[in-house]
Structures are given as C-alpha cells and as structure tokens.
Image (cartoon, grey):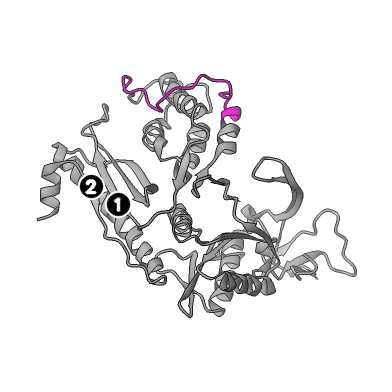
C-alpha cells in the first residue's frame, strides 16, 4: 500500500469523520484444493459510508457467464491459446474522486500530529472501490487500442493486421485469447507495464470453474470441488445418489403453516443457484422450482432440495464440454409446461442455446401471467428465448466479424405447431 501511494497521513478536518478498517485473513487455494498462499488484506468498513458524502456512483460491470462460455468455445474452435492473468490488489490502482478519511489501522503508527489517513486510492471494502478500479482498467485498455464490445462492457476487442485479440475481465481476473500469439504476448506486456500482474499461463481455473482438457482435444467446464464443498456444508456428502434432480411424481405447493422447516433452506438454494448459473443447466428447472418456496419452506420442500444434492452426488464431474469442430453451429431451443404450478396455474418457460454442440446460455423462469392454452404458454416462452438469443447472436457475430468468419443464423427450435405458425406470420 505504501508503494502504491494508497494513503497519506492527515489530520481529520473539523466536521469530517473517519471510517473504520479491519484486517481480513484468507487462504487462497489452487484448482486441486491445495494451498497456494496466505493472504492478509486491509479493508474499509464501507457500510459506514454515507451516500453523497463518502461516495456517489457504485455500479461496476462484471462479465456475463454467457460471454465467458462463448469465448472458451470460440478459442477451442479456432485452436487459440487461452491465458489467464490476475491483477495483484487491483482495487489499489483506482484514484479516489471523493475525499475519504479512515481510522489508523491496527499495527500502523503515524509520526507528527497526524491522527488519521486520507485515501488517495481506493481500498477493498469501499462502496465505490470496484467502480473506480473498473474505470481505471477500462481507460488503460482502451488507450492501447482495444474497443469495448457493444454487447458486454467487460469484453475488449483489438484487431491488428487481420489478427484479433480478446480480453475478458471479471474484477481482477483477466483472460486473453486471440489468433496471434505475438499479439497476445504484446498485450500482456502492455498490461504488465501498467499493473502488477500474476501470469498463470494457460487458464485452468477461473471464477471457481475448472477447465479440464480431454484426450480428444475438448475442454470441459466443471465445478467438482465446489460440488464437494456444498455437499459437505449441508451434510449431504455421504448421501445416496439419484439419477434425476426432480421427483416428477411429487408436486409441491406453498404452505400457510406458522412454522418453517428447521434447515438452511435459503442458504442451500443460493449455493445451488451459483452452480446452476455457471456450469450446470441440468439443474436449472429443479433449482428454479424449489426457489418458489423461499418464503415459508416446509419439510417436503427441503426434501426436494436434498434430492438435488443427491443428484449432484452422482454427477460431480458433469459440466459443459466444448469440442473442436468444422463449423460454428449455433441453435436454440424453447419450451414450456402448461399450468404446471398447482397453486396459481402459471406456466414455466425454458430455453437453452447451444454453440458447437454445448450449452452457452439457458434459463427456466415462471411466467408472470396465466396462459389459457399450451400455445400461449409456448409463445411466451419463445418470446423470452428470442430476447436472449438476439443478444447472444449479436455478440457472436461481433466477435466473428473480427476473425473473417461468417456468423451463423439465429435458429430456435419450438415443438408447438400453433406457436411456430403464429411466430412466422
């Protein structure tokens, strides 16, 4: 922090207040679970900041999982390298716009009449820290010739002499791929001149997701260690496996009971949602189904959650597998049940989009209105799928345009004849 010039000693002005700080200790682990290093980080107690005084804007974008999966798929298709960089204490690069003072941290002594520290740069814990860092990174990357994607603000594209390089950023994790190893190396050098970075080389573990190479040249995105962790956390690590995440013979309904089940229901559903959004489309419907009962969960609802855990017990290594191919095949599928919710008879929409034979986007969402026919339910589901599909298709075409590759057509499969007839009129 001293090397980065994060603080400067100050005397607290009259009428100003200093926010507190604390030390946070953490163990960082490798993809195999072994210890990589021990970390100590000084953080601010940002919950004591006041809007309009200590901060104003706080929003900071992060890359979408869909974009991450698409970049991995495209890199595998073209045979591009996929390298990973990690910015060391990234937030300490952001220049503060507001005047913020903090209490002198434990273990730090000041000389003279100073009684606090003024933050010159952002530190972890501040409400605006992530935004300030993102603005700093964005400004520098654009200054070295990159353009921000029109469809994901955390994807940067640069084209030089017919070769392209893609930079993907999720807070302080940076992925780089492209058609020219020389251009990738030059980009790394440029980034390292501005930021202190750890170059991990070939990406094998990002955002808690393992990238496992197969003997056929494929790469699989999976979260085996995360599955093991949540099974152990909810005492399901020795449960008996089942072959499906949902028992279709059991239909759940909300309860008016005065008491709730004595189980960490919300915590478990939240843990499953993280897994579902990252690498497991096969549990999307099941997780969405049990999440409808967060308000007043009963024993039968908890049994349904435990069934999902039992399914995961037998499918720990399942994930998304991208294989090398001869053409970029992109297609979507849309479907819906009809009046599937026994409580209000609303339907559930579902869709998935496949890129080169593997899912890159999926969703399962309860509809907001009651459909009076199967075709109406399917039409609403198709509308949801088209919204997602148009965005993915435009992002895909934007990337492929810089590789001299023709973008595929957007095609969505729908099995209801009435719906397809209405949609094509």
| Cα distance between the residues tagged 1 and 2 | 8 Å
User: Residue 331 got which mark?
Assistant: 1
Judge the density around disc 1: few (<14), some (14-19), many (≥20) Cα neighbours within 10 Å: many
The stretch drawn in magenta includes residue 43:
no
**Could you say which disc has been placed on residue 276 in the image?**
none
Residue at screen point 39% across, 67% down:
400
Tell which of 69 and 294 is nearer to you. 69
* Magenta stretch bounds: 231-252
Quadrant occupied by the C terminus: bottom left
**Position of residue 187 measured from the top left corner of the image (x, y, whole percent):** 60, 72
Residue drawn at x 60%, y 28% is 232
The residue lying toward the viewer, choosing from 288 and 48, is 288
Of the image marks 1 and 2, the number of the one nearer the N terminus: 1
Answer with the quarter of the image where residue 11 lies. bottom right
State the image coordinates of residue 131 (x, y, percent, origin top left).
Answer: 56, 64
Q: Can residue 50 be seen?
A: no
Figure quadrant of residue 55:
bottom right
Describe residue 196's horizontal placement relative to residue 267 as left or right.
right
Q: Secondary structure at mark 2?
A: strand
Image quadrant where residue 149 sits: bottom left
Query: What count of labels does the image hold?
Result: 2
């Amino acid at each position: 922090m001293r090397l980065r010039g994060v603080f400067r000693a100050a005397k607290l002005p009259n009428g100003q207040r200093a926010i507190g700080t604390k030390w946070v200790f953490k163990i960082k682990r490798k993809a195999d679970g072994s210890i990589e290093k021990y970390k100590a980080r000084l953080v601010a107690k940002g919950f004591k900041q006041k809007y309009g005084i200590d901060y104003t804007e706080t929003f900071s974008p992060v890359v979408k999982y869909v974009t991450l999966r698409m970049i991995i798929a495209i890199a595998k298709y073209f045979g591009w390298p996929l390298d990973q960089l990690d910015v060391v204490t990234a937030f300490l690069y952001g220049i503060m716009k507001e005047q913020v003072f903090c209490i002198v941290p434990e273990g730090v002594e000041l000389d003279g009449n100073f009684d606090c520290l003024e933050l010159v740069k952002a530190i972890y814990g501040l409400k605006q820290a992530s935004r300030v860092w993102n603005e700093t990174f964005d400004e520098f990357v654009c200054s070295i010739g990159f353009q921000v994607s029109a469809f994901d603000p955390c994807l940067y594209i640069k084209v030089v002499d017919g070769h392209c390089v893609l930079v993907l950023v999720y807070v302080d994790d940076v992925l780089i791929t492209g058609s020219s190893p020389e251009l990738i190396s030059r980009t790394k050098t440029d980034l390292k001149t501005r930021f202190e970075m750890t170059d991990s080389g070939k990406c094998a573990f990002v955002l808690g997701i393992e990238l496992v190479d197969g003997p056929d040249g494929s790469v699989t995105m999976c979260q085996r260690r995360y599955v093991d962790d949540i099974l152990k956390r909810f005492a399901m690590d020795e449960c008996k496996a089942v072959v499906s995440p949902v028992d279709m013979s059991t239909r759940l309904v909300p309860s008016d009971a005065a008491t709730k089940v004595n189980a960490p229901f919300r915590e478990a559903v939240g843990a499953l949602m993280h897994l579902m959004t990252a690498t497991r489309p096969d549990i999307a419907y099941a997780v969405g189904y049990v999440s409808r009962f967060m308000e007043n969960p009963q024993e039968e609802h908890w049994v349904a959650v435990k069934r999902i855990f039992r399914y995961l017990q037998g499918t720990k290594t399942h994930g998304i597998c991208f294989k090398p191919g001869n053409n970029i095949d992109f297609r979507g599928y849309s479907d819906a049940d009809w009046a599937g919710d026994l409580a209000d008879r609303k339907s559930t929409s579902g869709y998935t989009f496949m890129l080169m034979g593997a899912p890159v986007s999926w969703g399962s969402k309860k509809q907001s209105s009651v459909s009076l026919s199967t075709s109406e339910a399917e039409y609403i589901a198709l509308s949801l799928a088209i919204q997602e599909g148009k965005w993915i298709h435009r992002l895909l075409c934007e990337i492929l345009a810089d590789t001299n590759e023709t973008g595929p057509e957007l095609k969505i499969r729908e099995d209801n004849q009435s719906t397809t007839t209405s949609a094509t009129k």
